[in-house]
Image (cartoon, rainbow, N blue to C red):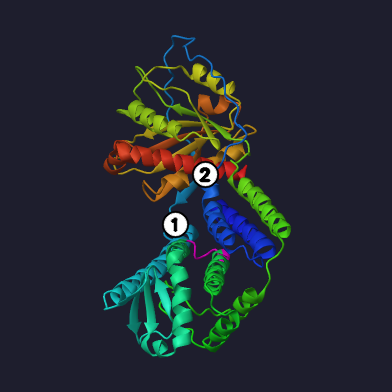
Amino acid sequence: MINYIFYTIVSLGCAHFVYYFFLKKQKTFQFNRFFLLGSLLLCLFAPVMEINMFDAVPSITEISLQSSEEQTISKEILTGATVAEIQKPSNTLPNILWSLYLGITVCFMFRFFKNLFGIIKLTKRSYKRIGSLKLVETNDYKNASSFFNYLFINSESLNDEHYSEFMIQHELVHCNQWHTLDVILLELLLCIFWFNPIMWLYKKAIVQNHEFIADSNTVKSGIDVENYSQIIINSSHEEHRVPLTSGFNFIQIKNRIIMLHQSKSSVLKRTLKITTALLLFAGVFMLSSFKDLKEPLIVVVDAGHGGHDSGNLNEKDIVLRISKQLSKLSDEKIKIITLRDQDEFLTLKDRVKFINVQNADLMLSLHCNAAKNAEVNGVEAYYYDKNEYDKQSFNFGEILVKNQLQLFSKRGTVKKASFFVLKNVNCPAIVLELGFLTNEKDKAILTNELNQKSIASSIYESLIKIRQGK
């Protein structure tokens, strides 16, 4: 999420920079409109689209899992010295920030729909038809403004023939150009992306460009540019208009007057600036939409037990289903290699042999715990503390346990252990005990299909954090 926010702020900032220095002063208003809207949408969604131009993740050759020995798996007792006990925090900073974001977003959405319902209420009033416009007289707002083909105007303004003539022609352009759609889209995006400062600059630029388009087309209709400019100046003190509408008056009157009197650049100059703007934006878009070229985190997932070794109760089936759900999440960031995909028995040596040829960044062995005391619950991670991977394994175990506490109890532990698999693999390794099957609450979570998907998703999120920290 943080990466997405960063990419959108940077890419939108670069796109707005291109508009400001290459297009804003050009009288290519229609092109500017679609550039602003197009760049806004592309920069917001490009990081999600992630165009894949380079296949950065090579295929991994898997070896056969045929058992080389007939011996049964040695039963290891899951005990070890507790190194860290992890408590689920009641209020974490991410949760506080997320709650703050949702609260502000709800306020913006409330304001949006309040304004929208206010406009709908105005459209229920009687109106006069002028061409394609439906003119609604109102004393609530001083400025003339349009919403699709509705024109809201102060009754007193109609007494001024010059003002009403110019204003109606101006608002007719907003209506015909469907500027209301742009405004609604922009307001909805601002409700969601209000935290992005560049969004507010985009709003200012888009609304101003609407006014440039309306002014230009109004003058082209035969209205004298000097008289029209004087009307804009005289009405500049009237700024209150219906929210979510396109208005005849706009706070940046100076820019409108300058643009009305500015001559068009030569065709060659306009073409060069447009081409430059498109090329620069194309570069911004491609950079923000590339797939992450950082090396993937290669994780071997070992669904514990299997075959005639059932583990604790139906442990072998539960961890196999979670392993399969986790394998579905494998992508260019996290490369999941599952050690067993069916109910089969594998010796410890077979498991270690398979893991050691994968050149993995992490081995994750999934299990379900059990205890004589049915009240015991929670998540436990085991690691080996006497090899070169001890610190990494401990850190990875902490991350994996913390993420699981969203589903299980508020307590988790990281323990030292000398299990055969932990000692003999050539990468950081974790045995993750996903709750206690002897505890009713943990068992209900572990045996539920939806919860198994949630557990897999939580493990994936942990792996993403591990990859970011590497």
Residue occupying the far front of the picture: 222
Q: Whole-Å distance between the Cαs marked 2 and 1? A: 34 Å
Q: Position of residue 314 (x, y in %)?
A: 30, 28
- Disc 2 secondary structure class: helix
Q: Which residues are magenta?
A: 193-198
On the image, which quarter does residue 303 sit in?
Answer: top left
Query: Quick check: 98 left or right of 155?
Result: right
Query: Quick check: 110 left or right of 350?
Result: left
Q: What residue is at 50 percent from the left and 20 percent from the top?
A: 351
Q: Position of residue 61 (x, y in %)?
A: 56, 19
Q: Look at mark 1 in the image and give the residue it sits on.
A: 89
The three-letter code of the residue at mark 2 reads Met
Q: Are marks 2 and 1 in contact (CB under 8 Å)?
A: no
Residue 453 belongs to magenta span: no
Secondary structure mostly seen in magenta is loop
Q: What residue is at 59 percent from the left and 61 percent from the top?
A: 32
- Disc 1 secondary structure class: loop
Residue 49: numbered disc: 2
Q: Earlier in the sequence, mark 2 or mark 1?
A: 2
Nearest to the observer: residue 225 or residue 239: 225
State the quadrant of the C terminus: top right
Visible in this render: residue 329?
A: yes
Residue 196 belongs to magenta span: yes
Mark 2 or 1: in front is 2
On the image, which quarter does residue 428 sit in?
Answer: top right
Q: How many marks?
A: 2
On the image, which quarter does residue 113 sit in?
Answer: bottom left
Query: Quick check: 220 left or right of 26?
Result: left
Rate crowding at label 1 as few (under 14), some (14 to 19) or many (20 or more) other CA atoms within 10 Å.
Answer: few
